[in-house]
Image (cartoon, helix red, strand yellow):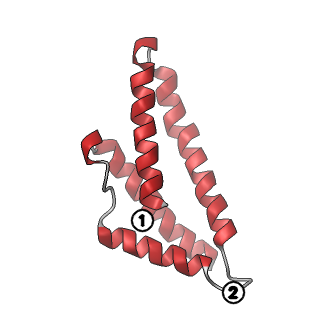
Amino acid sequence: AFDEGWSHVRQHGVEAALSRLESLPKSARGRILTPEETSQLYTITYQMCTQATPFNWSGKLYYAILDELQDICERIVEPKLAKASDANLLHKLIDEWSKHTALTKAIG
C-alpha cells in the first residue's frame, strides 16, 4: 500500500539523508546514502510506480516527495536564511542550495 512504501521512503530516504547532510562537510555530500540504501529506495520506488491501476502510486509519490521538500524548505531552510546577516546570507544560501541538490539527488 502507498502508506507503507511512502513511510519507508520518507524514513530511510528523506529523513536519513537530511540528518546526514547536517553533519557532512560540503566535500562529502556526493554520496549521502550507501549504495545498499539507494538500491533499496529505488526498488521500493520502482515497485510503487509500476503497478497496474489502482495500485500505481507514481503521481501520489511524486506529490508526497514534493510536499516533503517544500516542508523542509519552510521548516529548516527558511529560518536559517532569515537569521543570516546580510554579509553571510549569500554564503548560507549557497550552502543550503548545495544541501538541497544533494538531498534531491539522493532521494530522486
**Kind of residue at badge 1:** His
Where is residue 61 shown, x and y percent of the image?
Answer: 62, 66
Name the secondary structure under disc 1.
helix
Where is residue 23 shown, x and y percent of the image?
Answer: 29, 44
Residue 25 visible in the picture: no
Q: Where does label 1 land, which residue?
A: 12
Residue 94 - label = none
**Kind of residue at badge 2:** Ala
Where is residue 21 shown, x and y percent of the image?
Answer: 35, 47
Q: Where does label 2 land, which residue?
A: 52
Q: Earlier in the sequence, mark 2 or mark 1?
A: 1
Please rate how many residues cluster around mark 1, counting C-alpha atoms within 10 Å: few if below 14, some from 14 to 19, many from 20. Answer: some
Q: Residue at left 62%, top 80%?
A: 1
Name the secondary structure under disc 2.
loop
Task: Report whether 19 appears left or right of 78.
Answer: left
For the residues labelled 2 and 1, the Cα–Cα distance comes to: 25 Å
Please rate how many residues cluster around mark 2, counting C-alpha atoms within 10 Å: few if below 14, some from 14 to 19, many from 20. Answer: few
Where is residue 20 shown, x and y percent of the image?
Answer: 33, 51
Q: Residue at left 61%, top 81%?
A: 50
